[in-house]
Image: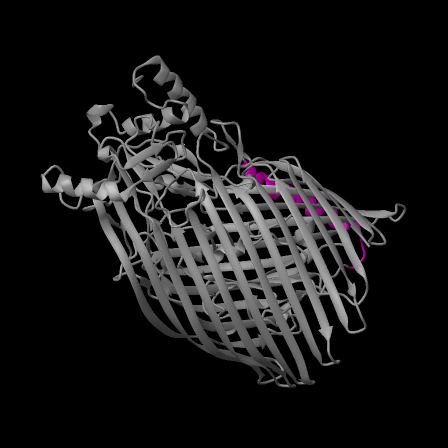
Amino acid sequence: MLTKTKLFKHTLLATAVAMVPLSASAAVLEELIVTAQKTAQNINDVPISMDVLKGDDLTTNAINDTTSLAMSSPSLTFQEGFNASSSSFAIRGIGTYAYEGGIQPSVSFVVDDVPLSRTAEFVSDLGDIERVEILRGPQGTLYGRNSIAGAISVIRARPTYDFEGYAEQTVTTDDEYITRLTVSGPLTDNVRGRLSGLHKDREGHIENVFNGEELGGERTSAVLGKLAIDFTDSINLLLTGEYRDTDATAVATVAEAESGHGLDPATDGALNYVGNLRTAALGGYLGGGAGMGTPEFAAALAAGKKIIDDPFKTAQDGPGEQDIRNHGFVADLTVEINDELIFKSLTGYRKYQIQSALDIEYSPSSVTNDGDLPVTFALRTNLSPLGNSQPIQFDLEYFSQELRFEGVTDTMDWVAGVYYSDTDEASIAEIVTYVPSQGLIINDPRTGKGNWKGGAIFGDMTVQITDTLSVFGGLRWTVEDLTVDMNRQAYRSPVGSGGVVLDDENVYIDLDTVLPFVKFLEDNGLAPVGALGLVDNQVFKKKDRSENWTGRLGLNWDMNEELRVYTSVSRGFVGAAGNLSRASTPDNYSLDPSVSHAVELGVKGVMFDNSVQLNAAIFWQELTDIQSSALVPGTVQSVLLNAGNMETVGFEGNVSWAATEMLTLDAAMVYLDTEIQDLIQPCYPGQTVAKGCVAGSQDVEGNNMIAAPELSYNISARLDFALDSMPFSAYMVTTYTWQDEFQHSLIYDPKNVEDSYGLLDVVFGIEDHEGRYSLSVFGKNVTDEYFASSRSAAENTQGRVLTRTSRNAQAYYGIRARYNF
């Protein structure tokens, strides 16, 4: 019997074969020019394994944001966090998995040749794009630190010499409305401008049963402006300014409420006591004396189970808000000194802020209606460093400057330069916990600040040894100073002190009353010393310096006029991380840099009269001192750690085939064999000695890396119909994306394994022969295949398994109309 996946593959192959003879005309692929090595080259001349996504293809396939790129390139994966600052990208299974600030990314994201600083900035809208280049493997020589997994380079459209523009509107069945407007052209004889605007409004895809609201939606307004000034024929300045304002809601849903690890089974005959309470709370049970065994509890339990069984439903009384403000400026100066030498200056400044508020327990329970749960959460106290309704804030501000020379001769291409950056990051938050059985409020107001200041000198060259053989290599030396400034407290305040006032999601704490009351209890032997009051106070400022090098060395050999083979060795590193989390102390304020070594052997070229494009590589990569953060089982606290080492061996390949003038086929595949080494982790909830749990810890060596499916691939077919008798042409695009199962968490909880899944997208469209307008109808995930963007567990505090569900985990359809002028 054929599975759904096999049936689709057979059907697609049969379609391709059937369509080949539709046209006897010769078909060729368009030449693809990239700037992966900081100079314009044919993709076949670049000795790097890479994917390229053209802007027109992104538009056609309704890929509107960076998170959707993971569905277009099988080597790229994305894990969603509670907000953008805790989300992460990975290439070849290598990424930085951060729940809180301070960790630098492993995938470098570069926009218009200027690197962004943190993963949070990556999660944004794509608009007015010329192309996206996804470079796989360490790219530290030209892209600097934080590119050990690879680099994603986004090249946006420049101002044009002729007046042009477009208006575009997209509407979907899940109530998303996207409006894009762009105008470009000359302002004077020597000045050209381009202005793009975006407005997106999408209703949420998660139903909050508690109050009828929809969560997971977004409202974004953004503007991007470019100004190109030609001072002379050889001196050009490109100024770019942008601003984005996003209001969104984010939420996790309880996928399994079973809990009670370590509780006496006599309480409920199984490890379900707290789980049943959590389930009933989702169904509307908030305590108050009804108790287990009553009809009211049974009804609430049944209602709660229905919510748990539906990943698109939740029940919570708190918000899931995040407000994002992002703006940036780039000055790109290019001076053509002569035909063989170019000077470039790239100056960048960006400021980014996220303010968040979330219902951490994801239920209707609160400090005044606790549902008999052992732990509930409040939104904030008056001790919050922010003092507003959004008690979690991430701030980022940085400046960068790169100066480089680019040279080209008959036998050598080279790049050399210097780079400087100054980055300020702040992670500000307070988590407020109420323990009803002990009458305690536990809270931890925290402000963690980090500053990274550093510079680098680099050079890279390719030398033609013979007509068919060239050698390439480069080296970069980076020095970076890190300063961590932490101000963190932890209070345990007795509710009965008279200095604590509970008000649903808000708690007022008068320390002038609480702390003397705590001292009275301790002096009279009524409470253990240190159990109440200010139990932790970390105020410190620490500095660290890291120095490291990156580089590459390789050979390029032209086998014939069509195929080129290359091999390379490379080294990269991720700069030192600052521990800005709730667990930061003077002893663990920083994490060691992660270092990666890689070997790659690849082949590139065009065949069969330029009708087939091939890009394939086998690789080995080793990563030491992985930087990561992990949730502590049974809590909502995360810790930053150097998570051991890993090794990966794999194969990746891309093939494009212009089968006929009508039919183009594309296929991409990645196979990964990853292995974690030298890593001890806490046991997952319910893990026994027989399953490897010893004294609360487990050795996870030998496991596959998280977010690293063994096999991933996508297949796409495009049919173009000329329709000469009509004023327009038509096309159809079908894309199928599949990936193997993988683990979401470093504690390797079997309940956090994501099953394999495949997504099918279809597009039907028409385009005016004169290029004035286009209209398309598209379907995303038309087979309605469910998958989770992330899975985690906090056991007693949040439920056994929490999932985050993307809007892409369900079928939806849309229509896009565009008018060019």
Would residue 353 be found to the left or right of residue 801 on screen? right
What is the total number of numbered labels drawn onto the structure image? 0
Q: Which residues are magenta?
A: 2-26
Looking at the image, residue 612 lies above or below residue 740: below
| Dominant secondary structure (helix, strand or loop) of the stretch shown in magenta | helix
**Rendered location of residue 362, percent (x, y):** 41, 34
Answer whether residue 342 is visible to the viewer in this image.
Answer: yes
The furthest residue to the right: 725
**Rendered location of residue 292, percent (x, y):** 29, 19
Would residue 296 be found to the left or right of residue 174 on screen? left
Would residue 91 be found to the left or right of residue 560 on screen? left
Answer whether residue 100 is visible to the viewer in this image.
Answer: no
**Rendered location of residue 746, percent (x, y):** 35, 50
Q: Does the stretch in magenta take in 17?
A: yes
**Rendered location of residue 233, percent (x, y):** 75, 80
Q: Does the stretch in magenta take in 215?
A: no
The furthest residue to the front: 512
